[in-house]
Amino acid sequence: MRVTVAIPCYNEAPTIAKVVSDFRSRLPLAEVVVFDNDSTDGSAEEARAAGARVVREKRRGKGHVMQAILETVDGDACVIVDGDDTYHAEDVEALLAPLADDRADLVVGDRLGQAGSEALSDLHRLGNRVIIAIINLVFRTSFRDVLSGYRAVNRNFMRTVPLITGGFETETELTLQALEKGMVILEVPVRYRARPEGSHSKLSPFADGYRILITMAVLLRNHRPLYFFSLIAVALVAADLVWAGAWAAGALPTYRLAVHALVLTGAAGAAAALVLVGVVLNAVTAGLRELAALGRRPR
């Protein structure tokens, strides 16, 4: 199995050489490629000196780097690992084993079970739990860590899964797109340590958390349209009932009956229209899935 180790990197000069060396030692036959996101601290030079091939991606954002990885790597499997030295190269065999046995298309390193408080702050841990809980509820899954920066994918994944987002929400999109494509996703426990001294995180908990939630909403709209539009319809009906209750209780002015009637009927009509839109788009999505399934069959 031809393996490539792809390392997204943005201003990781203090750690990138060690990450490259660790993976070259662990997988001596694999090609190690650093995808440098236009770093300004000499990360690319450090990576080359450590023996990696460097591919420059000028578009800022981890999602753009992930797009470049999927477009560039040509092998049987690709290990994707952050360049901040928070993941252990010794765990790479556990990620590759399900791919070698053809038991999975995507293997995600679950770091939450073994990460100590020095590696993941309470805020980051809480944010991870909330996002994972929402994904598991909405998409009916049982994932433990969709935001991990340590994963492995096979050739089928690299040639099939599209990526749209450009930021840190890309890990969530990778997992959900694979889920939508009917691919087999496995999670294996991996170790996770704190960043070394001098290395700084580029993640913004609130801004990137917001982008992740927006990405989830967009993917839900695209791939589960009936569910998405039904949720909005339910929210409209609930607001409609609250308005009607307040009006009946005398909490709203009673001299503008036409306004109240317009609001109530308008909200009910909009809810019905949203459900209809969801039904139509759900049928279209089902048809596209069938075409995609037929397209994967050998001719």
Image: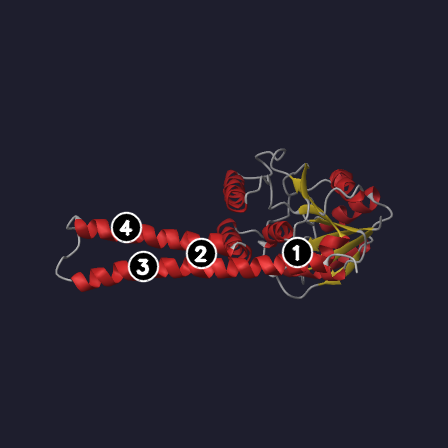
Q: Nearer the viewer, residue 97 or 22?
A: 97
Residue 260 visible in the current orientation: yes
**Which sits earlier in the primary sequence, circle 2 or circle 4?**
2
Residue 170 percent coordinates (x, y): 61, 54
Q: Secondary structure at mark 2?
A: helix
User: In the orientation shown, which residue stands out farthest toward the bottom?
Assistant: 58
Task: Name which residue type carries label 3.
Answer: Ala
User: In the orientation shown, which residue stands out farthest toward the right?
Assistant: 29
Task: Name which residue type carries label 4.
Answer: Leu
Task: Name which residue type carries label 1.
Answer: Asn
Q: In the image, 150: left or right of 226?
A: right
Label 3 and label 1: CA atoms lie apart by 50 Å
Q: In the image, 105: left or right of 29?
A: left
Residue 42 visible in the current orientation: no
Label 3 and label 2: CA atoms lie apart by 14 Å
| Residue drawn where x is 19% and y is 53% of the image | 247
Rendered image: mark on residue 283: none
Q: Secondary structure at mark 1?
A: loop
Q: Nearer the viewer, mark 2 or mark 1?
A: 2
Q: Residues within 10 Å of mark 1 (few under 14, many from 20)?
A: many
Q: Residues within 10 Å of mark 3 (few under 14, many from 20)?
A: many
* Pointers 3 and 1 in contact (C-beta within 8 Å): no
43 vs 126: above or below: below
Residue to which mark 2 is pinned:
229
Task: Name which residue type carries label 2.
Answer: Phe
Q: Secondary structure at mark 4?
A: helix
Residue to which mark 1 is pinned:
11
* Pointers 2 and 1 in contact (C-beta within 8 Å): no
95 vs 203: above or below: above
Residue to which mark 4 is pinned:
241
Residue to which mark 3 is pinned:
267
Label 2 and label 4: CA atoms lie apart by 18 Å
